[in-house]
Image (cartoon, helix red, strand yellow):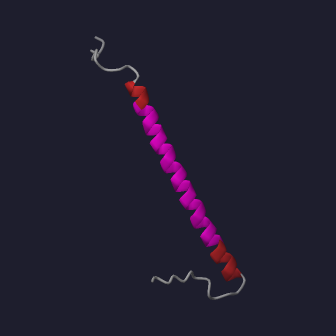
């Protein structure tokens, strides 16, 4: 027996939910990629500094 369908429900609603979930996933993926690229760039700069023989390669932060 086929499942009963709600006549008030829009047939395209499931497609919109999937599209919204895909957009959220892509946004999270892009943000994660940007964060990862920045972290790798910082580590690469730190490694280059250490490879050149310097010892003051840590980032110093001065909080006001």
Q: Residue at the far top: name it.
A: 1
Q: Is residue 24 magenta?
A: yes
Q: Quadrant of residue 11?
A: top left
Q: Where's residue 61, x and y in %?
A: 51, 82
Could you tell me what secondary structure mostly forms the magenta stretch? helix
Q: Where's residue 18, x and y in %?
A: 43, 32
Q: Residue at x 52, y 55 (%)?
A: 32
Q: Is residue 33 magenta?
A: yes
Q: Residue at x 56, y 80 (%)?
A: 59
Name the quarter where the N terminus is drawn: top left
Q: Residue at x 65, y 71 (%)?
A: 44
Q: Where's residue 28, x and y in %?
A: 48, 49
Q: Quadrant of residue 3?
A: top left
Image position of 6 with respect to 18: above or below:
above
Q: Quadrant of residue 14?
A: top left
Image position of 13 with respect to 25: above or below:
above
Q: Where's residue 10, x and y in %?
A: 35, 20
Image position of 36 with respect to 12: above or below:
below
Span highlighted in magenta in the image: 17-44
């Amino acid at each position: 027996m086929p499942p009963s369908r709600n006549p008030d429900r829009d047939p395209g609603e499931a497609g919109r939910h999937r599209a919204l979930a895909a957009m959220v996933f892509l946004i999270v993926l892009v943000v994660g990629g940007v964060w990862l690229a920045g972290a790798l760039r910082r580590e690469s700069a730190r490694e280059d500094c250490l490879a050149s023989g310097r010892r003051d390669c840590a980032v110093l932060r001065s909080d006001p």
